[in-house]
Image: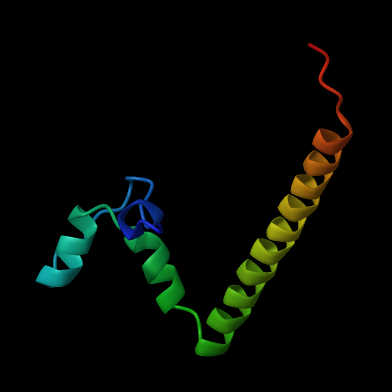
Amino acid sequence: MFEFTLACMGKGNYVCPPDAGPTWREACEAGCDMEELESNLRLTPWERMLKHDKKLNELLEFEAFMEKLRQGWNFVKSKHVYSS
């Protein structure tokens, strides 16, 4: 299962701005990567969509690679003869 708290962990160098609201501070203290969030907020909606598409394509390519690896492993296992 996806763990939001682990997936949004920052590098630990972020300093919360003094005028940050309580929700922002709470997210910062919880370890969320506020630096990444701020950089995403600087992007236009179109740039965010392009970034999302790039990440999605990278994930799909990785999943396709892992599926080929799994198929190859199953093939090797099917041809392996156990000698006891």
Outermost residue, front direction?
84
- Residue 38: give x, y in percent of width and height: 37, 70
- Residue 17: give x, y in percent of width and height: 20, 63
Outermost residue, right direction?
79
Residue drawn at x 19%, y 68% as measured from the top left: 24
Q: In this rendering, would 76 be left or right of 16? A: right
Which image quadrant: the N terminus?
bottom left
Q: Residue 50 is drawn in which quadrant?
A: bottom right
Residue 25 is at least partly visible in this image: yes
Residue drawn at x 15%, y 71% as measured from the top left: 23
The foreground one among 53 and 36 is 53
The foreground one among 30 and 2 is 2
- Residue 31: give x, y in percent of width and height: 27, 52
The foreground one among 4 and 66 is 66
- Count of marks, rendered view: 0
Residue drawn at x 75%, y 60% as measured from the top left: 64
Outermost residue, top direction?
84
Which image quadrant: the C terminus?
top right
Residue 83, above or below 66: above
Residue 81, above or below 49: above
- Residue 32: give x, y in percent of width and height: 30, 58
Residue 5, above or below 18: above
Residue 17 is at least partly visible in this image: no
Residue drawn at x 80%, y 49% as measured from the top left: 71
Q: How is the image coloured?
A: rainbow
